[in-house]
Image: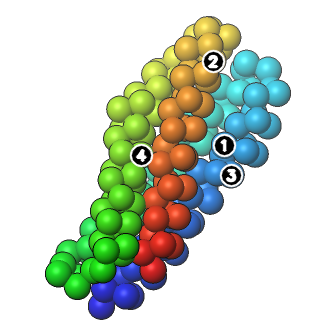
């Protein structure tokens, strides 16, 4: 059972890391070239659509599956697998904390700014959101690598 949970952890975390990386290296640089009104409109739409059911399952699974793999194999993990699993779990939880404490409040503020000054809204949103996103992307990429090591 632990092996299956570990394989599923790698898959789910890889999918999540890929999603985050795509935003980091493709979506956000593309949006950066848009005028303020288009940028804020696009980000508001992303922020409405992204936290749908499929994303929420992925968001929760990147914590639940490594935790389950760690718990089901307690006492059986070797000196590499156990610490790698713990490290991966710490990374995904840290990334989620960045999301909850950093990105989501900025998303909410951007949503509330609709109909106002898009230039000011963008200035308050984009640089901070991108910084938080870089941090959470780094966390999930490290988590994925650690899960690969544990596997």
Q: Which residue is denoted by mark 4 in the rendering?
A: 95
Give the image location of residue 17, x and y in percent. 56, 58
Residue shown at the point (30%, 91%) measured from the top left: 1
Q: Quadrant of residue 133?
A: top right
- The secondary structure type at the circle numbered 3 is helix
Residue at 79%, 20% in the rendered image: 35
For the residues carrying marks 2 and 1, which lies nearer the camera in this image? 1
Seen from this angle, which residue lies furthest front?
79
Q: Secondary structure at mark 4?
A: helix
Of callouts 2 and 1, the N-terminal one: 1
Q: Is residue 76 above or below residue 119?
A: below
Q: Are marks 3 and 1 in contact (CB under 8 Å)?
A: yes
In this rendering, is residue 21 above or below 118?
Answer: below
Q: Badge 2, how many Cα within 10 Å: few under 14, some, many 20+?
A: many
- Residue under circle 3? 22
Q: Which residue is nearer to you in this view: 134 or 109?
A: 134
Per the model, the C-alpha gap separating discs 2 and 4 is 23 Å
**Residue visible at 50% across and 32% down in the picture:** 132
**Residue 77 seen in render:** yes
Of the residues under marks 4 and 3, which one precedes in the sequence? 3
* Mark 3 and mark 2: Cα distance apart in space: 21 Å
Q: Residue under circle 2? A: 122
State the CA–CA distance, disc 4 to disc 1: 14 Å
The mark that comes first in sequence, 4 or 1, is 1
Q: Which mark is residue 93?
A: none
State how far apart marks 2 and 1 are (Cα): 17 Å
Nearest the eye: 33 or 85: 85
Q: CA distance from mark 3 to mark 1?
A: 5 Å
Which circle's residue, 2 or 4, is located before the other in the chain?
4
Say the numbered circle drawn on residue 24: 1
């Amino acid at each position: 059972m632990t092996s299956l949970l570990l394989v599923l952890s790698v898959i789910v975390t890889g999918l999540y890391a890929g999603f985050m990386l795509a935003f980091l290296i493709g979506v956000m640089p593309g949006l950066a070239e848009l005028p303020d009104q288009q940028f804020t409109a696009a980000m508001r739409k992303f922020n409405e659509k992204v936290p749908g059911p499929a994303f929420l399952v992925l968001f929760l699974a990147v914590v639940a599956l490594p935790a389950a793999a760690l718990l089901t194999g307690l006492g059986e993990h070797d000196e590499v697998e156990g610490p790698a699993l713990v490290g991966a779990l710490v990374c995904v939880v840290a990334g989620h904390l960045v999301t909850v404490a950093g990105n989501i409040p900025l998303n909410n503020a951007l949503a509330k700014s609709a109909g106002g000054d898009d230039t000011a809204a963008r200035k308050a949103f984009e640089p901070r959101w991108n910084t938080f996103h870089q941090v959470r992307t780094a966390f999930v990429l490290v988590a994925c690598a650690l899960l690969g090591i544990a596997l």
